[in-house]
Amino acid sequence: MPGQTRQADGLPYAAVALLLVTVFLQGCTASGERPASAPLPLVTVMEVQARDVAIFSDFAAQTYARNMVDVRSRVTGYVDRWLFQPGAEVAAGQVLYVLDLRPFQASVEQARGNLRQSEADLDFARKQVSLLQAQASLASAEANLVKAQQDDERLKPLVAADAASQQDLDAAVAALRAAEETVKANKATVEQTALSTKTQIASTEGRVGSNQGALHTAELNLEYGTIRAPIGGRIGDSLVPVGGLVTPTAAQPLTTIVPLDPMWVRFQVTESEYIAWTKRGQQLPAGQLTLILADGSEFPAKGRVTDMLNQVDPKTGTLELQASFPNARHTLLPGQFGRIRVQVDERKDAIEIPQKAVQQVQSMQAVYTVGPDNKALLRAIVTGNRSGEMWIVEQGLKTGERIIVEGQLKVRPGATVQPQPYREPRPGN
C-alpha cells in the first residue's frame, strides 16, 4: 500500500502488530468458558478461491448527440402551419412546417409564362422567315438578270444588221447592268439575313435556357416552402411561431432534431491510463463498456469505444474517448451525466472477497477467518483493486481458507461460531 515501505514476512509491520494484539485477545477469550445456554452465533462464510479477475475503472461521462441537426428554412417566408408535437419522434422527410406558398406559386407561374414566350420566339427564329424572303428576292433578281442577258445578246446582232435601233440596245445594256447590281445586293441581303437569323436563334436559345433555370428555381422555392425533417429523431420545441418570418440566414433555427439511436457518450482518461493501454498493444479500451446512470443503475445495453481525440488536453492531462450505446427504446437523452465502467486490466489467480467481509480496525483492514474448529480469528489483510462489490486481497489470505461474510457484529476473536455457506447474490438482485 502507498506509504508502507517496510514489511516483515510479507505483511506490513502495522499488520504484524495487529496480529499480535489479536492473538493475545483471542487467547484471553479462548481461556474463558461460554455459558452453555448461549447459542452459537450464526454467520455466513465463504471459502477463498483464486481465479482470474477483470479489473474495472469508472470514469465520469456525459451523453451527447453526435448528429444533432438544426432545422432551417431555405427560403424567406411566413410560417403558415407547423405540424409536429414538441418532444415527439419524427421520421426523415416528415413535414414539419408549411410556409405561405402563394408568393412561390405566383413565381412559378411567371417563370413558366416567360419560358413559353421564349420557346415561341425560338420556334419563330428557327423557321427563318426573313431568310426565306431574302432568298426569294435573290431568286427573282437572278431571273431578271438572265432575261436582261438574253435581251442584250439578241439585240447585238440585230443592231449590227440595222434591224434594231441602237437606242434599244443601250436600254438592254442598262437593264443588264441594273439586274447584275440587284443580284449582288440580294446576295448580300441573304448573307446578312442568314447571319442575323443564326444570332437570333442562339440568343433565343439562351433566353429559353435562362427561363428554364428560372422556372426550376421557382419550383424549388415552392418545394422548400414545405419544410421537412432532414433526419429522424426526437424533435424539440418550435422556436418560431405561426406567422413568424423565417429567412435562410436567420441566427435562430426553427427547431432541432436529435437522433437517439445510437447514443454517444464522451469521457476522459488520464495520460498514464492511455500509456498503459498502448503498452498492452491497444489504442482503445478492449471489450464492452457499462454505462452507470445518475441513480446508480446500469444501462442495460453495452457500448463500445469507437473514437478518440487526436491530442491530450494540456490543461487537464486527459484524453477524450467517445463510445456509442444502442438506444432502441430512446431512454437515454443527450446531456445526461453518469459513469463509464471500463475493463483496464486482468489479474490471474487473484483472491477476491466481498467488500462487506472487510472490517476496518483503526487504520488497518481485517477479516474474520473460521478455522476447522469453527473458531473465529481476526486476520489483517492488504487489499488492492476493487472489482464491483468485490476486493482483491494482495496479502493476508490463502486459497482454501474460510472467511466470515455476514454476521461479524455477533462475533468476538476466538469465539466459536455456527457457519453456514454464503450465497453470492445474482446479478440484478
Image: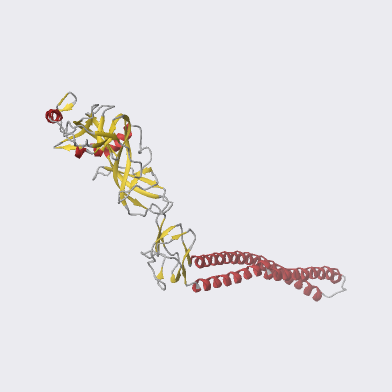
Rendered-image quadrant of the C terminus: top left
Residue at the extreme top: 9
Q: Percent from the top left, x then y, of residue 66?
A: 38, 52
Q: Is residue 368 left or right of residue 137?
A: left
Q: Is residue 363 left or right of residue 254?
A: left
Q: Nearer the viewer, residue 32 or 9?
A: 32
Q: Residue at x 53, y 72 (%)?
A: 105
For the question of whether residue 383 can be seen, the reply is yes
Q: Percent from the top left, x then y, of residue 196?
A: 62, 67
Q: Nearer the viewer, residue 226 or 257?
A: 257
Residue at the extreme front: 37
Q: Percent from the top left, x then y, of residue 145?
A: 77, 69
Q: Percent from the top left, x then y, of residue 108?
A: 54, 70
Report the coloring of the rendering: secondary structure
Q: Which quadrant of the figure has residue 159?
A: bottom right
For the question of whether residue 177 can be seen, the reply is no
Q: Which quadrant of the figure has residue 234?
A: bottom left
Q: Nearer the viewer, residue 320 or 29?
A: 29
Q: Is residue 409 above or below residue 232?
A: above
